[in-house]
Image (spheres, rainbow, N blue to C red):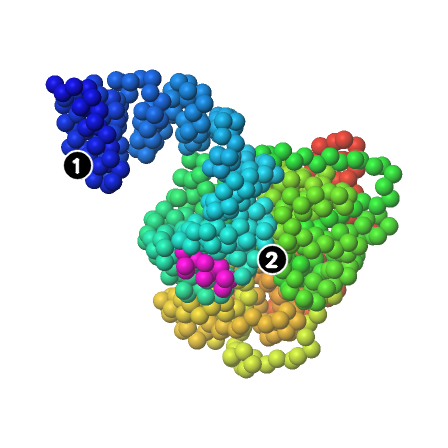
Amino acid sequence: MKRSMDIENELKRAIELHQNGLKKEALAMYRLIVKQDPCHADAWHLMGLVAFDEGRLAEADELVTKAVALAPDCVLFRTNLGLILAESGNYEKALDEYLGAFNLDRNCHEASYRAALMYQNLGMNEDAFTYYEKTLVLKADHAAAWNNLGNLAMEFVRPEEAFVFFNKAVEIDPGFAEAFNNMGCLYLKLNRPDDAIPCFEKAIDLLPDFYQALNNLGNAHKKKRAWNRAAECYERALTLEPGSAETRYSLADVLRSAGLVDEAFSMFVETVDIKKDHGHALQQIVSILESWCDFERYEHYRALLKRLALKAMEENGDCPEAPFSCLGRDEDGEYARRVTAYWSDQLQDFIKKLGLVFQYDGNSEKERITLGYLSNNVKNHPNAHLVLGLFNCHDRDRFSVNVYSYGEDDGSDYRKKIEADSDLFRDIRDMSYVDAAQVIHTDGVDILIDLTGYTLGSVMEIPALRPAPVQVRYLGFPGSMQASFFDYFITDRIMTPPEDQVNYTEKFVLMPECYQINDRDQKIAPTVYTRADFGLPETGFVFCSFNSAYKIDPVMFGAWMDILKDVSGSVIWLLRENPHMETNLKAEAARQGVDESRLVFSDKMPKPEHLARLKLADLALDTRLVSGHITTSDALWAGVPVITKRGNHFISRAPASILTHIGLSELVTESLESYKNLAVSLAKEPGSLDALKKKLEANRETAPLFDTARFVRHYERALTAMWTLWMDGKKPEMIVVSTVD
């Protein structure tokens, strides 16, 4: 056996070879050393490091474990064994080694830092936080520890702390690209894209190939609706990670938002090809196929999406189904309630972590109740069309009216009128949801009325923070939010019979007449259109349905085709939303034995002109699972009767209530067969249809449906009852509104 001095000299030469990149030669010498001295812990350790460098993790584990066995008190050996175990994904064993190393040397900041990382990987965030703090006591300029503390503060939803930690990290290391990226993510999470963008840009300046930062920069531009800039970021990110399903999805989402739906659809399909269980891409595919009336492919992808959504909810994951999208996809509404409840539970868990609780002062001396209307649709939008007359009709001796808009300002007359009719109008679009909630609370809003719910572009974090003592759901989302942060739901007995209360977390406010407000002053253009203007036949019966394409399901479309076959020379007039819809419905008509020319499509028009052209139709046919809400009242305002089939849930019952409260309940049917029979009989009996139209014309002026002021008086009774209950310290309860004199 060689003398100890000779072995140590050989070890030094081997280490030099290792450091110079001659790993093969170094490894050969390490092996000779352990052959000569099997208890040489350093040589076993160094052999393990060579194996680790070359990616042979199992071998590295075995070799360094041997070194630790020979020298159990060596901090370096235990720390490096932890590195190998962590790289292998064995976080629990790695943690044991790091803790062991730290217990041997309480000044070893590296062991403490590594232990914190393992705690974080294992989801033991409180312990991770403690060990990062220990690390910083030992090494205050440990930038990575400050950065990771920031990430944990984000997990704990402590944004102010997180900003302090990230700023400390970049102060220590101005080139710390990851910390800038994380800071941007925090700003974006707080709905502050303008602050997020410079952070992501700095991260990319420091690290041009920083894929995640590029992707996040795209997200920030998307939040600002800067579609071209967002697309550029995603495209650049894809050059770095061409196989990224997430970036491909984000790019497709931007393309769809920019109106490039065909290109977006192809990319969503590519995303699913890359990642079969990409639920959000499936959701987009289903939504597009729905709008294209592509019934066959829709059913296929819908089944895949539902399966993934159910799995996600069972495993407490990210549910790809959106509450609004699935409201009308099942007849009983049970699946939609489950999805909505899951979304609300996730949101409430997140808000709870913020720890922000508003205090309310009940002031019985207040002369007026302050109402706050919250919406992202204060623009040329169907919901704005409905509520246009609401704000001006409020009794200003009893109520003050605030409007909080977080959607785009389209400069339309609708927005201008709502602004003018408000006592206080605030554009909170660029505020974080925390700041927006704070503003609502500071303004002293007593009753917050949300007009959106889980619809496109909504920010439910604002009402979830409960900035007002009483919170109400109205319009927008046609169903229960399944959330504790809404107290009341404006409805009526037809929409929600009292026995349906068990399916709602909000207490019913049962209006005495139709729950849906309508604008009595909405204008119909004076233009006198002819059938020829829209390609309609000069003679023959004209059915119409100007509902959105996604509402047309194959069952109801089949019923429409049966009606056309029974009414000779008739046509159905539909809204053209996209070329695919027209092509697919014409093909389906032909498949069912109906000449495709009997389907007439027209493009969207400004509301007054649309109402004027509606007069050309003889009879409107409602959709089934998702019925026409404002579409129904529009047809009636234009003088066109509507036939509906009463459904089983809120979203499919609106026309039943609307027709009843304009005195035309005879047009509400209870089965598809009676729906078809009624449509055919009215088309074949001109006298009966004329009588209906005359009745509609008379009732339009006298029935409650279009009496905006009457609706508001009923509604104000409900608001007063809500406020009285709260002032009396009582919990929300069902409110049944009596009719005004």
Pointer 1 residue: 25
Seen at 67% across and 67% down, the residue is 412
Rendered view: 42 above or below 590: above
Q: Amino acid at mark 2?
A: His
Seen at 45% across and 42% down, the residue is 318
Seen at 49% across and 59% down, the residue is 230
The circle drawn on residue 629 is: 2
Binning the other alpha carbons within 10 Å of mark 2 as few (below 14), some (14 to 19) or many (20 upward) gives many
Q: Can residue 43 be spotted in the picture?
A: yes
Range covered by the magenta-colored residues: 227-237
Q: Quadrant of residue 294?
A: bottom left
Quadrant the N terminus occupies: top left
The local secondary structure at tag 2 comes to: loop
- Residue 625 appears at what percent x and percent y? 51, 53
Q: Which of disc 2 and disc 1 is earlier in sequence?
A: 1
Q: Are marks 1 and 2 in contact (CB under 8 Å)?
A: no
Q: Can residue 561 be spotted in the picture?
A: no
Seen at 64% across and 65% down, the residue is 410
Q: Quadrant of residue 728?
A: top right
Rendered view: 56 above or below 489: above
496 or 570: nearer the viewer: 496
569 or 167: nearer the viewer: 167
Binning the other alpha carbons within 10 Å of mark 1 as few (below 14), some (14 to 19) or many (20 upward) gives few
Q: Is residue 428 left or right of residue 598?
A: right
Q: Amino acid at mark 1?
A: Glu
Q: Predominant secondary structure in magenta? A: helix
Q: Is residue 738 left or right of residue 238?
A: right
- Residue 267 appears at what percent x and percent y? 38, 59
Q: CA distance from mark 1 to mark 2?
A: 79 Å
- Callout in the foreground (1, 2): 1
The local secondary structure at tag 1 comes to: helix
- Residue 431 appears at what percent x and percent y? 65, 50
